[in-house]
Amino acid sequence: MLGFRIAKRDKSLRARVGELILPEGRVETPVFMTVGTNATVKGLTTQQIEDTESKIVLGNTYHLFLKPGTQIIKKFEGLKNYMKWDHLMLTDSGGFQVFSLPKKKIEDEGVIFKHPETGEEIHFTPELSIQIQEILGADMIMAFDECLPYPVDYKYAEKSIDRTTQWAKRCQKTLINKKQALFGIVQGSIFEDLRKRSAEDLVKLDFEAYAIGGVSVGEGHELMMKVIEMTEPFLPYDKPRYLMGVGLPEDIIGAVERGMDMFDCVIPTRYARSGTLFNRTGRMRIDHRKYRADAYPIDTKCNCYTCQNYSRSYIHHLVKSNEILGTVLATIHNLYFYQDLMKEIRFAILENRFTRFKNEFLNNHLSKND
Amino acid sequence: MLGFRIAKRDKSLRARVGELILPEGRVETPVFMTVGTNATVKGLTTQQIEDTESKIVLGNTYHLFLKPGTQIIKKFEGLKNYMKWDHLMLTDSGGFQVFSLPKKKIEDEGVIFKHPETGEEIHFTPELSIQIQEILGADMIMAFDECLPYPVDYKYAEKSIDRTTQWAKRCQKTLINKKQALFGIVQGSIFEDLRKRSAEDLVKLDFEAYAIGGVSVGEGHELMMKVIEMTEPFLPYDKPRYLMGVGLPEDIIGAVERGMDMFDCVIPTRYARSGTLFNRTGRMRIDHRKYRADAYPIDTKCNCYTCQNYSRSYIHHLVKSNEILGTVLATIHNLYFYQDLMKEIRFAILENRFTRFKNEFLNNHLSKND
């Protein structure tokens, strides 16, 4: 049930502008999805999330399975109703979180770990991941994959991608609600032949869209770009490609250039909470003394609620005083900045000036970091 | 520059409905003022404060003097501009905070204490309080008084009220900006003759409005009501009376009945942050297990943004997960609840049914506290 229409492709690059078409809404790509891990985009009301121009919110299967639990969300007929987000939603499979746990047992059947609060033993399987995601009821859902750490042994990675393919099949078989678009996730770490094999195996299963997983795990910008380059040629041109958990503006721009359509990352929200704010001329540490009496908005060219109303000095004061409003205003700004970046990216592709846009943006944005 | 028009007085009680008329706005009384101690109503944007129907925000001289400091706020031409509150504002004198400090030296000249961060010795005087409040630029400002603890020795209290009167005179002499309405503060602890004397001494100085201070310091509801009863007869009928730092709904209702017009308190915001929510049928501890799957809004009769959009279950989840949004939504609700209460109080007085309203409200509100 996921349509994808490509409106424009850059002449010399793989960058493209498209549209995701889902039963409950449409959205232009390249798109940045806002992370709402715990049934909340930290600090923001629904109205404020909308005001950041976010079109898709990402929910987190692992966290929501633990708290509030699927029984509660089932009663509310899905996560959208529960958190009052009436627009598009994607849920991840829980894979990334499960594989980040310090203690777990990985078997072909699934992953066994202990509930962090109750200590109860949980058998997390591809089937369970899909069953939870059906209850959460997002428009787009992810296959349960083994997210490999970086670095990882070639032999282990080789065995792992076959397991990920088997799990992907089991996810497809489990899914009943055909309104939910299921994404396959390519793994293979930084190994060219494994990325190729993983992509080809998944493409044979004919998913509605494909994700590149196992990136943004410490490999750095250059290797991340290489992983995209070694994977993208084996993904169908006419289906959306989602680069998971990425990233900084320069990562996103590099990935769009290499044919990626969808992104999500905690960076804008997490940076906001620690007082790092994005603007066109660099990243600001708003708690720095130099902003104490600065009457300008965070970014003089930004139209977000924060920049339209408040000064750097005021946000500096809030952040230095550990005031919640500092986090809220910073989060609103950073999310809007990301949505604005994606809009500029789309315009640049549509107007055949992506490379020029990229050079100008990066030149400005990386020039004056605090 | 403070006009006060009494629109209606209850036939058998001292309760009255009026209107504060200031150069920058008007507001109906009895009014509850929302506390914004640190240049922020914790967690709420200006838009959200407005949506709670708050008409007056209270700023805090002591806190703002320490951080961000008067130089910053002077640069922004006042606290309203700094925190983007374009409506009415009142600042307290700093007295309450200064006298709450564990170590301070009280002299007739003023109070000496150490800056909590820099250790610098600060001489806080009536003159300094007014100078700071002129920079903050609120519509209504408070005389610097000695806020007595409870309980306190009669002899000390007697000496103290004379000092408070002397300080009040010095505040009047210091104030240059006549657009700012200066309130005198009656002290005298729970001693009838001292409250009378303090009120009479201050009334002779002809302030634009009068406050009752030194309440809500641990004396309890009954004594608080007695203090109002022993003070109110000596305050001019045609000037606003502000009961400082009060309180719970039952305190406010009791005080309105006894002729008070203005209130402020941290209770709605502080309770919100600890998960205690007000509704018509009682106070709820939203983190209680019984709300886990409760699909109702906090208060089924409430029109606030929180109750119009979110369930008890969702707010329970947010609060249990220490999510900022839980605090934000709870704060929005509690503040709106207070504004709604004041509106109901005003209507009840206007319609000659205050006593019936009081009995019904208290009967419902105190019936089912968690």
Image: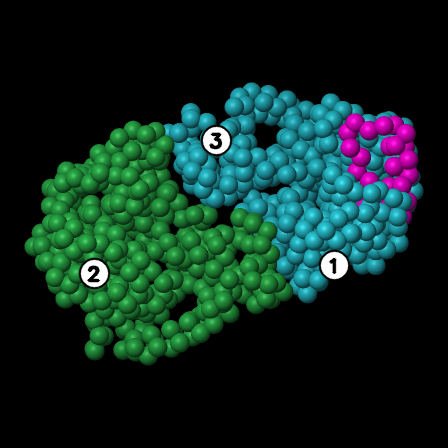
Chain colours: A cyan, B green
Query: Residue type at mark 1?
Result: Ile
Q: What residue is rendered at 15% in x and 59% in y?
A: B195
Q: Which disc, if any, is residue A286?
A: 3
Give me the chain letter of mark 3. A
Residue A334: % across, % down: 56, 37
Give me the chain letter of mark 2. B
Q: Are marks 2 and 1 on the same chain?
A: no
For the magenta stretch, what is the residue range? A143-169
Which residue is denoted by mark 1 in the rendering? A135
Is the residue B128 above or below the residue B245 in the image? above
Q: Residues within 10 Å of mark 2 (few under 14, many from 20)?
A: many
Q: CA distance from mark 2 to mark 1?
A: 61 Å
Identify the image quadrant of residue A28.
Answer: top right
Are circles 1 and 3 on residues that touch, CB within 8 Å? no
Are circles 2 and 1 on residues that touch, CB within 8 Å? no
* Helix, strand or loop status at disc 1: helix
Residue A116: % across, % down: 69, 48
Which residue is denoted by mark 2 in the rendering? B190
Give me the chain letter of mark 1. A
Q: Nearer the viewer, residue B168 or B196?
A: B196
